[in-house]
Image: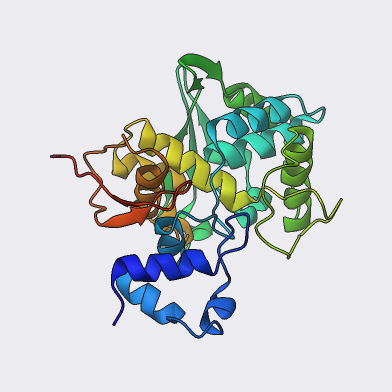
Amino acid sequence: MYSDEELLAELRQQASENGIAPSVSEMNQSGGPSHSTYHQNFGSWWQSVVRAGLTPRKRNPLTETQWKQFHDAATSLAKPSWKLTALLAMFTGLTKYLFAELSSSWIDQRKRDTLIRVPRFETQSGDRWTFRIPEVWTYNGDEIRTELPGLLSWYISNQELPVRSDTAHTRIIYRTAVDANLTRRQQVSRNVDFPIDQSIPLVRHGDLRATGGARMARNGAPAQRLGRRLGGSHTGWEATGSDLFLWCHVHDEDFSHPDSEVSGIYLDPDSGDVRRIKSEGD
């Protein structure tokens, strides 16, 4: 029988030198605790990895600086359709499939906001998914325009689909990451969908989606609004609000959110020391 601390320490022991978590198969072959043990103790493999202070192989949120770099690169893309695709990937939970199905009829432009209404026959839940596009976001206290409202106006006028396939979508995200000079971001998977250069790490769609959710959580967005923007229940996304809250707890010791019910221990990503998640009442 392993304690939580022993499980996290063992997981960290099996990680690579640069802090990338082992795969499930690697962990099962290590002779130590199995993947199922981690799932039972911590709820999921991803949550186990994050509690161990390691880099997950998917849904790996960008830092604030990397997010700013990606946004700058996205807004500098020459093709409006590419720019719209990259920015929607940053600020919404639209899936690759929904990008290809995106229609101007889904977009309702009002005087002060823009709504996207994904029809119920396009969602996995069978319910219509409605969410608002943000006009600004913050970085170091400054408000920065997302540029999405203007690009959606362009899209309605031109009727040009941002992407037509998963490969095209991946190409745009990858190209934006390269333009953002994110070449030193740790490679977390050998399965590169669009290998321009094997030495350049890929920022994946799921990374951007998770980053947007983590940013909303840090900014105090209610869990309901966070879920509405990311559309977890509408798209069958395996991430949960607890995942995003956990990420913030581990990477920001001062993080506190009234909707977070995450508790327990984690290992400091830098030192490996045991920390305890502070509750809202602490």
Residue 24 in sight in this render: yes
Q: Quadrant of the N terminus?
A: bottom left
141 sits to left or right of 75: left
Furthest-right residue in this view: 196
Residue at left offset 72%, top offset 57%: 166
278 sits to left or right of 38: left
Vertical position of residue 39 compared to residue 217: above or below = below
Please state the horizontal and vertical placement of residue 71, each as a whole percent of the image.
64, 29
Residue at left offset 78%, top offset 29%: 77
In the depicted view, which residue is nearer to us: 6 or 80?
6
Q: How is the image coloured?
A: rainbow
Please state the horizontal and vertical placement of residue 140, each as a whole percent of the image.
49, 18
In the depicted view, which residue is nearer to us: 181 or 115?
181
Please state the horizontal and vertical placement of residue 157, each as a whole percent of the image.
70, 27
Residue 161 in sight in this render: no
Residue at left offset 46%, top offset 82%: 32
Please state the horizontal and vertical placement of residue 175, each as a whole percent of the image.
79, 41
Vertical position of residue 88 compared to residue 199: above or below = above
How many numbered markers are drawn? 0
272 sits to left or right of 176: left
Furthest-top residue in this view: 142
Residue at left offset 60%, top offset 42%: 89
In which image quadrant can residue 156 be found?
A: top right
In which image quadrant can residue 125 be found?
A: bottom left
Q: Quadrant of the C terminus?
A: top left
In which image quadrant can residue 35 be found?
A: bottom left
